[in-house]
Image (cartoon, rainbow, N blue to C red):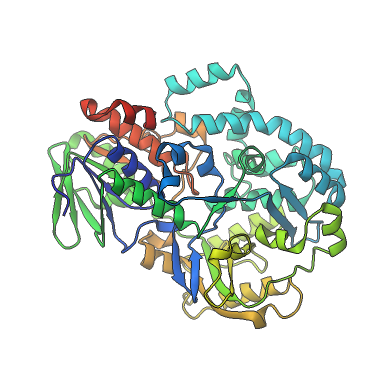
Amino acid sequence: MVHDPEVIVVGAGHNGLVCAAYLARAGLRVALLEARDAVGGCASTVEAVGGRVNICNCDHTAVRTVPLIEELGLDRFGLRYLDLELTMVAQSWSGDQPMLQFHDVARTLESLAVTLPDQVEPYRRFLADAAPVARLVMELAQQPPGPRPALARLAHRRGAGIGRLLRWSRRSVAQVLRQYFSSETIMGAVIAGGPAVWGVSPHTPGTGLGVLRLVMAHLVQPGRPVGGSGRLTDSLRAAFEAAGGTVLTGMRVDRILLEGSRVVGVRVASGEELRATKVVIASDPRAAVAEWLHGAPASVGEFVQRWRGHADREGYESKLDATVAALPRYRGLSDRMLGAVGVDAAEVLAATTFFVPTVDGIAEAHRLKQRQQVAARPILLANLPSVLDPTMRTGRGEHIFSLEVLFTPYGLPGGWPDSPEPRRWLELYAAQTEGGFLDGVQQWRAMTPDRYETEFFMPKGYAQSFAGGPFAALFGRSPELTRYRTPIDGLFLTGAATFPGAGVWGAPGRNAAHVVLQAAGGAVTDSARAGAA
């Protein structure tokens, strides 16, 4: 057991690891507690179906907008990225022509000229409008939000992107997209990679900044860690332990210990207590506040009651993993078209391929999810990480295949274990390929919301996500999700539920560490201030 920690971080997903690494690097004694027997959470890579598979999609973009990789020296701990030039292939269930997006803008426009020529100028106009907004969002995400720092950043930008950021923050993603595009393929892909992953309808007000997913791949090159997404979290753990931190797995917290209005530690399910003057929750904030806090003083009663009034949200995403003996070939992408675009079949398979409904079809799929049903043609995100990264292949040389599916309700009638749905998704994907793909599937499994609940301690299989963008961060009703500090002295929040949100980003963990280090006063070293600022 770690001796006399100053800080306990609860939850060793990538944000918990980032936060803990910065704190340990600053010289604080830090214990990182994880309920599972391994770190990484949904950003990890695990043994399954005869190979190593990523728990979630392996494309990393947002984390490369934050300087944490350089600040924590993660390359010294084995982290290396393979860059994606072809960043996305999108095909629509509606029969609209496909879209191929490259990191290079010019190549993307040339590709659109082949498949969707009437979208070339709208795409060019969209990028001109969206790029300043995306740059502003990336800058705002690198600091704890607040009126003063935000206003200072906005003043420094001299208005670039500010008005549009505020307008898009209030609108739905469908409204913003329809100002530019008529292609259901483009609009569906943007929604599938943004608001759909957040679990909301494309017609939901306040989701407009989801359109930035399209421009981000041009500003920051997406990549994949060699060896799988979990190489990021493995390197974070190594950096944390190298700085003197202690990881304790199999430690499921069930109580936050208080003395008066101050945190004094946590209790785990075994009954063991760990003492510290600062506790950072990097897991579900509702469980922490509504279920783990007992005997909170009246002075924070409103805060506790507000969180106890939050209903548990239900999971909506599933993922299939398989080992395959032969690579697929897509029916909707002819050799002639690929040749005109300047790519080959292997490059296509290295990228993530989206199969998407129309905008209204996605909205209908969301409504069906609320009725505990799955759309006949849901959103599918397919990739074969072993094509770009041969180290992901099995010992027998088989490829790894993954298929993410949206929206898949937690409360499916009859339950998930005996449901025919996962097999239907695999068959639906196979129908978009030349014959024989299913025959080459060696082993496969389905990670459905019930499994995310039992195996990753996610209530009802729900993956946390911050509910808004910078506008919500400045004016939201839950300041602890954007300021990382709660009304209880010594209790802090981080993770995907806090600003700037879901996905493999790391900015919430980095920002929360900055706030904790400020609260630590004299314990902060000059080098830590430089690293966490």
- Residue 357 left/right relative to 496: right
Q: Residue reaching furthest bottom?
A: 439
In the rendered image, the vertical position of residue 179 relative to residue 310, given as above or below = above
Q: Nearer the viewer, residue 438 or 349?
A: 349
Q: Quadrant of the C terminus?
A: top left
Query: Is residue 482 in view?
Result: yes
Q: Residue reaching furthest left?
A: 259
Q: Nearer the viewer, residue 196 or 296?
A: 196
Q: Position of residue 472 (x, y in %)?
A: 48, 34
- Residue 437 left/right relative to 63: right
Q: Residue reaching furthest front?
A: 76
Q: Position of residue 245 (x, y in %)?
A: 26, 46
- Residue 490 left/right relative to 51: left
Q: Position of residue 101 (x, y in %)?
A: 72, 48
In the rendered image, the vertical position of residue 158 relative to residue 223, given as above or below = above
Residue drawn at x 74%, y 72% as measured from the top left: 433
Q: Nearer the viewer, residue 88 or 432?
A: 88
- Residue 237 left/right relative to 199: left
Residue drawn at x 40%, y 57% as measured from the top left: 41
Q: Quadrant of the N terminus?
A: bottom left
The number of callouts visible is: 0
Q: Position of residue 441 (x, y in %)?
A: 61, 79
Query: Is residue 421 in view?
Result: no
Q: Quadrant of residue 348?
A: bottom right
In the rendered image, the vertical position of residue 163 relative to residue 6, given as above or below = above
